[in-house]
């Protein structure tokens, strides 16, 4: 089976996981949406470029999708035409395409692709906007109309958790739904030999990795951390990430008098994030809105216990030996969970956490599900034909 995977989030850690998962079910050719081409252009296709290190990975130049722009429908029509041409190019080079697999409700161009090329498609939805929280603007009425059409014609709509599926259904979205947990590429998260040991240090290290935006609840985390560390000087917190809230959060840390034990590390390379996961005692994220947070899954795959909030699909995957689940916006409960881990940082079986998480969220596990979904999608299309 040959699948074209359409993505466009090169900095998102989930993108590689989904591509690898699909690779366990089919031969995958990847099209990465971009505003500017940075690889050598394909001859005769100025909107297409090929990865010099991966011949089955292409960039495709698309336009902005802001529905408030007067030319948005025109830009979307041009983008759809480019995808059709790109898929034809891939088919001519590698052989017939059995299925297209895209991500997000914004992939409405797939309707035209299917109608013109006769190729079925599936869509994986990740977007937190469907959860209806003030921190993540809901899709516009036009987006919802287009999403209904997109998903009605999809062979399958994959969601990463039941909570997301429920949110979509509340907007009147219908279709053939499947739940597949976000796959995590844990190959770069190899556990060090001393995993689970504290190497004699007397601090308790917490780490959090996310964009510094209201949805991630870092203001709540700082309040909770200040309360938990007030009578325990061992506690340390490293916040990895950047965003519009950074200066505000740094000011909050200063007012709470925890600036000397809270480090705002900014955006860091993946290798350094891996090192922090290996050298910390626990991961913490106080999200107000989420689906199935990849950073949480990665922390588990690195063997870390996790403190996070009961939003999105977190309750669907949390186990008691994986850490603590607390209500969102609940500073007292979050502080208590921080204290609980600080009181017994060696009580978690980190190799067990890593082993179980890698088994549950590995690309191979998602690949088994995608193999079934791909076969059903293409079989259904042949039956309709």
Image (cartoon, helix red, strand yellow):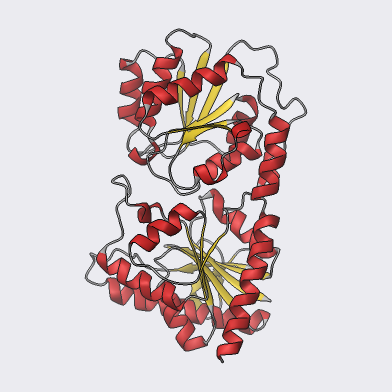
Which residue is farthest bottom?
Answer: 385
The residue that appears at 35% across and 78% down in the rendered structure is: 77
- Residue 284 in the image: x percent, y percent? 50, 30
Q: Is residue 373 visible?
A: yes
Residue 159 vs residue 163, the one in the foreground: 163
**Residue 261 appears left or right of 1:** left
Q: From this view, report whether residue 52 is shown above or below residue 220.
A: below
Quarter of the image with the N terminus is bottom right
- Residue 181 in the image: x percent, y percent? 57, 54
Q: From this view, report whether residue 28 is shown above or below residue 349.
A: below
Q: From this view, report whether residue 239 is shown above or below residue 27.
A: above
- Residue 326 in the image: x percent, y percent? 45, 32
Q: Is residue 79 visible?
A: no
Quarter of the image with the C terminus is bottom right
The residue that appears at 61% across and 70% down in the rendered structure is: 373
- Residue 172 in the image: x percent, y percent? 34, 67
Residue 81 vs residue 319, the one in the foreground: 319
The residue that appears at 50% across and 53% down in the rendered structure is: 161
Residue 166 vs residue 251, the one in the foreground: 166
């Amino acid at each position: 089976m040959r699948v074209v995977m359409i993505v466009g989030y090169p900095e998102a850690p989930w993108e590689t996981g989904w591509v690898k998962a699909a690779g366990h079910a089919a031969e995958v050719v990847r099209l990465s949406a971009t505003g500017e081409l940075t690889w050598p252009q394909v001859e005769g296709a100025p909107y297409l470029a090929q990865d010099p290190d991966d011949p089955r990975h292409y960039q495709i130049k698309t336009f902005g999708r802001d529905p408030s722009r007067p030319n948005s429908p025109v830009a979307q029509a041009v983008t759809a035409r480019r995808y059709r041409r790109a898929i034809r190019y891939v088919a001519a080079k590698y052989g017939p395409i059995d299925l297209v697999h895209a991500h997000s409700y914004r992939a409405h161009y797939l309707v035209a692709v299917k109608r013109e090329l006769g190729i079925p498609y599936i869509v994986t939805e990740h977007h937190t906007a469907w959860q209806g929280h003030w921190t993540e603007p809901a899709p516009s009425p036009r987006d919802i109309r287009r999403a209904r059409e997109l998903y009605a014609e999809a062979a399958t709509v994959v969601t990463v958790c039941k909570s997301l599926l429920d949110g979509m259904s509340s907007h009147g979205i219908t279709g053939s739904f499947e739940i597949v947990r976000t796959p995590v590429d844990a190959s770069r998260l190899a556990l060090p030999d001393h995993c689970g040991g504290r190497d004699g240090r007397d601090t308790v290290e917490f780490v959090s990795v996310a964009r510094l935006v209201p949805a991630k609840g870092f203001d709540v985390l700082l309040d909770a951390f200040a309360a938990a560390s007030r009578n325990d000087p061992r506690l340390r917190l490293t916040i990895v990430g950047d965003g519009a809230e950074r200066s505000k959060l740094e000011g909050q840390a200063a007012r709470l008098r925890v600036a000397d034990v809270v480090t705002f590390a900014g955006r860091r390379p993946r290798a350094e994030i891996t090192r922090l996961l290996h050298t910390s005692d626990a991961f913490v994220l106080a999200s107000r809105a989420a689906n199935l947070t990849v950073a949480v899954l990665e922390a588990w795959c690195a063997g870390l216990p996790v403190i996070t909030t009961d939003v999105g699909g977190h309750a669907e995957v949390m186990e008691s030996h994986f850490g603590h689940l607390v209500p969102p916006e609940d500073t007292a409960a979050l502080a208590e969970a921080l204290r609980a881990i600080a009181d017994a940082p060696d009580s978690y079986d980190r190799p067990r956490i890593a082993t179980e998480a890698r088994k549950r969220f590995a690309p191979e596990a998602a690949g088994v599900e995608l193999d079934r979904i791909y076969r059903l999608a293409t079989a259904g299309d042949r039956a309709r034909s």
